[in-house]
Amino acid sequence: MEAIRCKRCGEESPALDKPPFQGDRGDRIRAQICAGCWKKWLKHQTLLINHYGLDPRDPKAREFLYSQVDDALLGDGEAESVDPSKQGGIKW
Ligand SMILES: [Zn+2]
């Protein structure tokens, strides 16, 4: 299995079998992000989808998720932190 130096965790880790997206973004993820970190990212993405009530079929929602990938995973920015305990708004 091919190993890469993962940008996210800094370890030599197995790469994804294939790019998770078509095109340049998918190639960059496969080259820079290990399979384990990508799995964690997918969990984080599920949190984002639930938190913001996103519909992944909505092109605008997809754009938002891609921008999160670019900033948080491939860029140097931190992932926008979502606190699952605050899900459902401010009433409690
Ligand atoms: Zn990693």
Image (cartoon, rainbow, N blue to C red):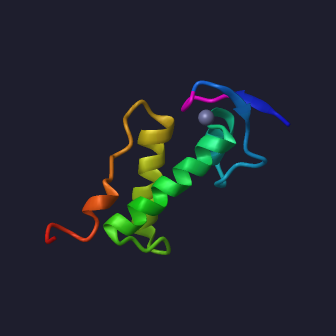
The answer to whether 14 appears left or right of 44 in the picture is: right
- Picture coordinates of residue 22, whole percent (x, y): 66, 54
- Picture coordinates of residue 84, whole percent (x, y): 34, 59
The answer to whether 27 appears left or right of 61 in the picture is: right
Of 25 and 47, the residue lying toward us:
47
* Residue appearing at x 82%, y 34% in the figure: 2
Total number of numbered labels? 0
Q: For the N terminus, give its image quadrant.
A: top right
Against 83, is 5 above or below?
above
> Of helix, strand and loop, which mostly describes the magenta segment?
loop
Against 43, is 88 above or below?
below
- Picture coordinates of residue 34, whole percent (x, y): 66, 38
Quadrant of res 76: top left
**Magenta residues, as a range?**
5-9
* Residue appearing at x 64%, y 54% in the figure: 21
The answer to whether 53 appears left or right of 38 in the picture is: left
* Residue appearing at x 15%, y 66% in the figure: 90
Of 61 and 14, the residue lying toward us:
14
* Residue appearing at x 52%, y 56% in the figure: 43
Quadrant of res 60: bottom left
**Ligand 1 is in which quadrant of the figure?**
top right
Q: For the C terminus, give its image quadrant.
A: bottom left
Quadrant of res 11: top right
Asked whether residue 8 is drawn in magenta, I would say yes
Asked whether residue 80 is drawn in magenta, I would say no
- Picture coordinates of residue 30, whole percent (x, y): 68, 41
In the picture as drawn, the residue positioned furthest to the right comes out as 1
In the picture as drawn, the residue positioned furthest to the front comes out as 92
